[in-house]
Image: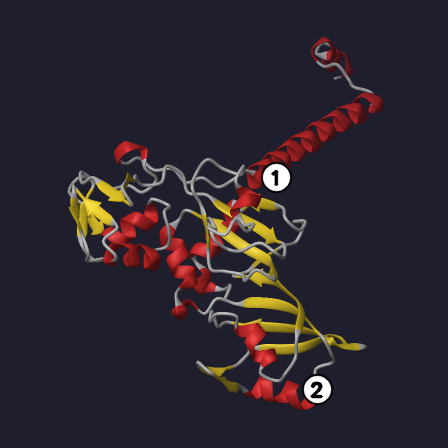
Amino acid sequence: MKKKAAQFDKFVKRKSNATIKEQFKQERRKWKKERADFFDKKRLEASQPIQEKTISKKGSGVAVDATDQMPINKYIAHCGICARREAAEMVKKGLVKINGKVISEPGHKIAATDEVFVNGKKVFLAKNLVYLLLNKPKDYITTTSDPQGRKTVNDLIQRATKERIYPVGRLDRNTSGVLLFTNDGELAQKLTHPSSLIKKIYAVTLNKSLEKGHFDQIIKGIVLEDGPASVDVLAYSNPNDKSQIGVEIHSGRNRIVRRIFEHFGYEILNLDRVMFAGLTKKNISRSHWRFLNEKEVRNLKHFDKGIR
């Protein structure tokens, strides 16, 4: 049997233990490299701006069949001019023309073949949908332009994209923190609508310690000049400094956080929004911005399923 087995020795080259170990090492290195390359690719994709492209008339970002129609205020919002509510106001003021005729009804339906002019300028549906997050500093107003020449948030993001994007909601001049920009009119409308109940968290610094009695009244709810006001969560950020307060709120009313504390005679020295609709300013320095990644955009579009 040994003699017969020896006939096949020329076909079988026995490998030493050292050779076998070396092969295992090489295979392991190859697997590690493939794994590293995979995650590097994912990180790179996540860092890129999300620009949703669809095939549509004149390269627009919202697919519109020639036979389809949409309300004029929705169309203007998708053009990246402003949010849908503001577009409706522009229509009512007679600033919008369709095929050369002034339209004053925001619900007026238009087709893809119609020509739309806003303030005398022809507009088209946005080519790419852009989503950007800014860590707003103080002394900047949340408007696209200011006739008084004051600094606006657009000054900080003007080189970010060629698309015309606008802020979702507002932060007053002396409030800093998270501010979202997009040209996705449908998403902007969803996030700013009163029924959306978007969660916002603020870090507040008062000019003096918040008294326990006032703390309890704010939790219970108070009445301001425009109606009842309440917060969802109120807490001392620093047990040793009761002028440092954390506030979680869903209301989108104008200057609501400031007005709640001013109601009791407190002065707000610093107001910083640290979260909006699940988005935080983590890893974004003051005055800087970044594009949202795909997961963040997906979460925003489905905010009713978990980020309120």
Looking at the image, residue 303 lies above or below residue 39 = below
Image location (x, y in percent) of residue 175: 60, 62
- Residue 16 point in image, percent of width and height: 83, 20
- How far is mark 2 from mark 1, CA to CA? 47 Å
Q: Where is residue 240 in the image (x, y as percent from the top left)?
A: 81, 77
| Residue of label 1 | 43
Residue positioned most to the right: 18
Q: Residue at x 54, y 37 (%)?
A: 159
Q: Between 160 and 184, which is closer to the camera in this rendering?
A: 160
Q: The residue under label 1 is which amino acid type?
A: Arg
Q: Residue 211 carries which label?
A: 2
Dot 2 crowding, Cα within 10 Å, few <14, some 14–19, many 20+: few
Which three-letter amino acid code belongs to the residue tagged 2? Glu
Task: Decide which of tag 2 and tag 1 comes sooner along the chain.
Answer: 1
| Image location (x, y in percent) of residue 13 | 75, 14
Question: Image quadrant of residue 83?
Answer: bottom left
Q: Quadrant of the N terminus?
A: top right
